[in-house]
């Protein structure tokens, strides 16, 4: 078994284990897909990727990471999203959508924007409690029970739209300090009701959303959940919590845990950051919770990716930044190792020419 071995996830067959990790492209207006997105996702499909995830796609207008995020909060978004699905299918990749709500980190802006203040927009932002992410960030509104109910509805509506657009799978974004992560972590969740306090209360919202989504997607469609396996903050969410959560998520119909980390607080980057430092999380969750996992973060070579798959430290490997500098990464890795994978006929001369 190696990175180019196929895999079946429920009823979804992937031609290899290489996943393009969700990456905000900060290029939409009012959530709508445009030509940039078609070229961007289409070329990664042409490049031989097994499974592509869209960037964080907002389920609600106040839930955007930047004002330029893709959205799935109105029916009018479906046609554009379907264009992404169609081009990925046309070039042999499967395509999933990452459903997201940025919580108190909404309207943080694009990495290349220079703001003095963050989170400010005409819309209120929401979170478990009215605690801003950091200095110069807007104070969110504390979510009421009604807000929580309506949030679950929004996830349901977004999922229905994703099904109409033809996506092969869905990933719930519950990582990186965004809304669902804010409920999970005691660093950000100070609620006194049944959605806060002890572990079983903090995981309640994510479980409700997972169950709601599983109840409307087809039985043969896998469901991914991305979590920050650890907060990297003293006293925060930890690996033990994640293992426990993964076991419960499995009973609620989640199939694969996408194992990232961090993002809950400013100034709390991964304390032990080094290349591929999150692989140990994927490995532990896979083993301890007996669930499929994705390894992500700093995977920069075929050998690294292959080692992870061969030694069963994850079922899939996700790559983000390497895909920004090379949409054809899977083909390049395969060719460098003599693995026979399909190359678009128009490009074959380029790959077989001995130069
Ligand atoms: C430009 C950019 C945008 C990102 N946007 C998202 C996102 O929308 N959702 C998400 O879960 N992670 C996002 N990430 C994190 C990546 O998916 C990935 O976890 C991280 O970059 C580590 O993988 P890498 O070392 O292969 O880049 C983003 C990363 C980058 C570089």
Image: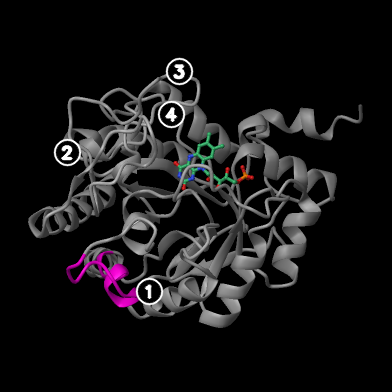
Q: Which mark is residue 194?
A: none
Nearest to N terminus: mark 3 or mark 1: 3
Residue at mark 4 to residue at mark 1: CA–CA distance:
31 Å
Q: Residue at x 66, y 30 (%)?
A: 325
Task: Label 4, secondary structure: give it.
Answer: helix
Q: Report the front residue among 154 and 343.
A: 154
Q: Is residue 63 left or right of residue 287?
A: left
Nearest to N terminus: mark 3 or mark 2: 2
Residue at mark 2 to residue at mark 1: CA–CA distance:
29 Å
Q: Are marks 4 and 3 in contact (CB under 8 Å)?
A: no
Residue at mark 2 to residue at mark 4: CA–CA distance:
18 Å
On the question of residue 1 being in view, the answer is no
Q: Report the front residue among 229 and 307.
A: 229
Near mark 3 (Cα within 10 A), the count class, few <14, some 14-19 or many ≥20, is few
- The residue wearing badge 2 is 75
Task: Label 2, secondary structure: give it.
Answer: helix
Q: Report the front residue among 260 and 130.
A: 130
The quarter in which the C terminus is drawn is top right
Q: Residue at x 39, y 42 (%)?
A: 56
Q: Residue furthest top?
A: 114
Q: For marks 4 and 1, give the one nearer the viewer.
A: 1
Near mark 4 (Cα within 10 A), the count class, few <14, some 14-19 or many ≥20, is many
- The residue wearing badge 3 is 114
Nearest to N terminus: mark 4 or mark 1: 4
Q: Is residue 267 left or right of residue 62?
A: right
Q: Which mark is residue 37?
A: 4
Near mark 1 (Cα within 10 A), the count class, few <14, some 14-19 or many ≥20, is many
- The residue wearing badge 1 is 249
């Amino acid at each position: 078994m190696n990175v180019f071995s196929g895999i079946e996830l429920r009823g979804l067959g992937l031609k290899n284990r290489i996943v393009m990790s969700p990456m905000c492209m900060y290029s939409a207006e009012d959530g709508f897909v445009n030509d940039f997105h078609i070229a961007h996702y289409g070329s990664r499909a042409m490049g031989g990727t097994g499974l592509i995830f869209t960037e964080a796609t907002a389920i609600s207008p106040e839930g955007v990471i930047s004002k330029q995020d893709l959205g799935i909060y109105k029916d009018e978004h479906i046609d554009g999203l379907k264009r992404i699905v169609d081009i990925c299918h046309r070039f042999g990749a499967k395509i999933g959508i990452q459903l997201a709500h940025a919580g108190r980190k909404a309207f943080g802006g694009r990495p290349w924007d220079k703001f003095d203040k963050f989170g400010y927009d005409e819309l209120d932002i929401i979170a478990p409690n009215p605690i801003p992410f950091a200095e110069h960030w807007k104070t969110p509104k504390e979510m009421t029970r009604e807000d929580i109910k309506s949030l679950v509805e929004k996830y349901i509506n977004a999922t229905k739209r994703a099904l109409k657009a033809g996506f092969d799978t869905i990933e719930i974004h519950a990582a990186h300090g965004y809304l669902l992560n804010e409920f999970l972590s005691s660093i950000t969740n100070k609620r006194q009701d049944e959605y806060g306090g002890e572990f079983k209360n903090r995981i309640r919202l994510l479980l409700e959303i997972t169950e709601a989504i599983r109840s409307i997607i087809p039985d043969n469609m896998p469901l991914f959940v991305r979590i920050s396996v650890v907060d990297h903050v003293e006293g925060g969410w930890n690996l033990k919590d994640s293992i426990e959560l993964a076991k419960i998520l499995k009973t609620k119909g989640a199939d694969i845990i996408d194992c990232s980390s961090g993002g809950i607080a400013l100034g709390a980057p991964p304390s032990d950051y080094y290349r591929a430092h999150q692989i140990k999380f994927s490995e532990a969750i896979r083993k301890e919770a007996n669930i499929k996992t994705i390894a992500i973060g700093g995977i920069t070579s075929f050998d690294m990716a292959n080692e992870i798959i061969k030694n069963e430290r994850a079922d899939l490997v996700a790559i983000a930044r390497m895909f920004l500098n090379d949409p054809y990464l899977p083909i390049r890795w395969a060719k460098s190792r003599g693995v026979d994978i399909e190359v678009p006929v128009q490009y074959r001369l380029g790959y077989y020419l001995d130069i």
